[in-house]
Image (cartoon, rainbow, N blue to C red):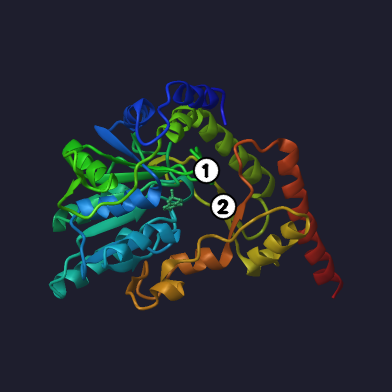
C-alpha cells in the first residue's frame, strides 16, 4: 500500500459510506477514466465481472462464438462460458506474446466461410504488455466485430502513446491482490460509450429498476465495488506510475544479470509501446541452457523462492478441450512453446536488490551445477 489508502478508508468509515457505492466509487471511476484517457469507467467487484458485463454489452449469448487469446488466465474465458457462448482460442505471436493477427485472420476467414462470425473478440494483454492492436482492430473493424481488451495485467502500459485497455470498444482492469495495484479484490470496465457503462452499472446492481418495491425486468448480478475498497483503489492509483517504474527496474536488473546466459530469452518489449513489466518473464531453451524452466522453478522452490511457469494455454486445458484453436502458423503454435519454456520470476514492486540477488544467485548455482555434472560426465 502507498500513503493515502488508509486516509481514504478512514474517510469512508468517518462518513459511514461503507457499502454499497458512495463518493469514493464515483471518484475512483472518474480518476481511473482520466488516467486511462477514456470517457468513463464502472467500478466492479472483479476483473472477471467486468469481462462478463462487456460480453453482455457486446450482445454475446447462448451458442455464439467469441474469439479469445489462448495464452491467458482462465478468467478471460470463463465469462464466455457463463454466457453459454463458445470460445474460439487464438494463438500468440513471438513479438508480444499476445494475440497473433495471423491466427486471428485465419479464424475470421473460416468464420466467413462457415457463415458464423464471432460476436466479440477478447484480446488479452499479458504480463504488462499490450497486444499489437492496430492489425487486430483493422481485422475486427472489417468484419464489424466489437473488441474487448482484457487489460487486467497491463494497467499502466501504453500502445502508440495511448493507455492499454482503451483501444477496443470495452476494456477491463483488475485490482486483484496479484495485480500491479490492488483493492484486495476489484475490477473496472472502461469505455468511451457512457450509455453502455450505465447499462453495465444497472446489471451490476441486480438490474434493479428505480422503484421502491424492487422492480426487475432483466437478469442482474451483484458486481459493484464497495465504497471502502474504492477508497483503497484511489490511493493505489496515486502510486501506479511508481509501481510501473519499480517493476521495470526489477525486469531490467534480471535481464542485465541473466540475459547473457545461453538459451535465456526475456519477454521482448514490442517497439509500439511501453510495457509495465508486471511480471518478469522469460523462456529457457533447454537445448541451449542445459536446464529446463521446470528445473529452475524446482531449484528456486528448494530455496523457498516462488517462481511459476507461464500461463498454461487455454487450448490445453481439460475444461476447454472441445473448442477450436488457431495456432500462429498452421503447424507452429507459439503459446505451446512459451508454456513449455516459460518462467515467471519474483517481480514484486517492493522487491529489494538483496531479494533479487538471492534469486539470481540461486539460478546461477543451479546452472553451474548442471554444467559441472555435464562436463565431468
Ligand atoms: C487477473 C486476471 C483477470 C481477472 O481479474 P480478477 O479481478 O481476478 O477477476 C482476467 N484476465 C487476466 C489476464 C488476469 O490476469
Q: Do tag 2 and tag 1 residues touch (Cβ < 8 Å)?
A: no
- Quadrant for the N terminus, please: top right
Residue 281 is labelled as: 2
Give the residue furthest to the right: 376
Question: From the image, which quarter does the C terminus lie in?
Answer: bottom right
Q: Please count the marks in the image.
A: 2
User: Dot 2, crowdedness within 10 Å: few (<14), some or many (≥20)?
Assistant: many
Q: Point out residue 121 in the picture as x, y percentages from the top left corner.
A: 26, 57
Whether label 1 lies within 8 Å of ligand 1 gets the answer no
Q: Nearer the viewer, residue 333 or 23?
A: 23
Q: Nearer the viewer, residue 376 or 46?
A: 46
The residue at which mark 1 appears reads as: 277
Residue at image point 56% right, 23% down: 3
- For the residue pair 14 and 203, the one nearer the viewer reads as 14
Q: Judging from the image, what secondary structure is the residue with disc 2 in?
A: strand
In the displayed structure image, the side of residue 254 where residue 79 appears, left or right: left
Tell me the CA gap for discs 2 and 1: 8 Å
Q: Secondary structure at mark 1?
A: loop
Q: Residues within 10 Å of mark 1 (few under 14, many from 20)?
A: many
Residue 47 appears in the picture as rendered:
yes
Who's the residue at 45% across and 72% down the image?
317
Q: Is residue 102 visible?
A: no
Is 44 situated above or below 97? above
Q: Quadrant of residue 187?
A: top left
Q: Residue 174: x, y in percent?
A: 42, 44
Q: Residue at x 45, y 25 (%)?
A: 12
Amino acid at each position: 500500500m502507498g500513503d493515502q489508502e488508509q486516509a481514504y478508508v478512514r474517510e469512508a468509515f468517518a462518513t459511514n459510506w461503507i457499502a454499497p457505492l458512495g463518493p469514493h466509487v464515483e471518484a475512483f471511476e472518474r480518476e481511473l477514466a482520466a488516467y486511462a484517457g477514456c470517457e468513463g469507467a464502472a467500478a466492479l467487484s472483479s476483473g472477471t465481472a467486468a469481462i462478463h458485463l462487456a460480453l453482455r454489452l457486446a450482445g454475446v449469448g447462448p451458442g455464439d462464438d467469441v474469439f479469445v487469446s489462448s495464452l491467458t488466465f482462465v478468467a478471460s474465458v470463463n465469462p464466455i462460458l457463463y454466457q453459454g457462448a463458445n470460445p474460439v482460442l487464438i494463438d500468440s505471436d513471438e513479438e508480444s506474446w499476445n494475440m497473433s493477427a495471423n491466427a486471428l485472420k485465419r479464424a475470421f476467414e473460416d468464420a466467413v466461410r462457415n457463415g458464423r462470425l464471432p460476436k466479440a473478440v477478447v484480446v488479452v494483454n499479458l504480463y504488462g504488455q499490450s497486444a499489437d492492436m492496430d492489425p487486430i482492430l483493422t481485422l475486427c473493424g472489417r468484419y464489424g466485430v466489437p473488441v474487448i481488451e482484457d487489460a487486467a495485467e497491463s494497467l499502466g502500459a501504453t500502445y502508440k502513446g495511448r493507455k492499454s485497455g482503451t483501444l477496443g470498444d470495452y476494456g477491463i482492469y483488475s485490482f486483484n491482490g496479484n495485480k500491479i495495484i490492488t483493492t484486495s479484490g476489484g475490477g473496472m470496465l472502461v469505455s468511451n460509450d457512457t450509455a453502455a457503462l450505465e447499462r453495465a452499472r444497472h446489471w451490476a446492481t441486480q438490474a434493479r429498476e428505480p422503484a421502491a418495491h424492487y422492480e426487475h425486468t432483466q437478469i442482474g448480478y451483484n458486481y459493484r465495488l464497495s465504497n471502502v475498497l474504492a477508497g483503497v483503489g484511489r490511493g493505489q492509483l496515486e502510486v501506479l506510475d511508481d509501481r510501473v517504474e519499480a517493476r521495470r527496474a526489477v525486469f531490467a536488473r534480471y535481464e542485465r544479470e541473466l540475459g547473457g546466459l545461453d538459451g535465456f530469452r526475456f519477454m521482448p518489449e514490442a517497439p509500439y509501446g511501453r510495457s509495465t513489466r508486471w511480471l518478469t518473464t522469460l523462456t529457457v531453451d533447454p537445448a541451449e541452457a542445459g536446464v529446463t524452466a521446470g528445473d529452475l522453478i524446482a531449484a528456486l522452490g528448494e530455496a523457498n523462492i516462488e517462481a511459476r511457469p507461464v500461463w498454461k494455454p487455454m487450448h490445453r486445458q481439460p475444461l476447454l478441450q472441445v473448442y477450436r484453436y488457431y495456432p500462429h502458423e498452421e503447424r507452429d503454435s507459439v503459446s505451446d512453446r512459451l508454456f513449455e519454456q516459460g518462467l515467471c520470476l519474483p517481480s514484486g514492486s517492493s522487491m529489494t536488490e538483496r531479494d533479487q540477488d538471492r534469486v539470481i544467485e540461486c539460478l546461477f548455482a543451479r546452472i553451474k551445477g548442471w554444467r559441472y555434472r555435464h562436463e565431468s560426465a
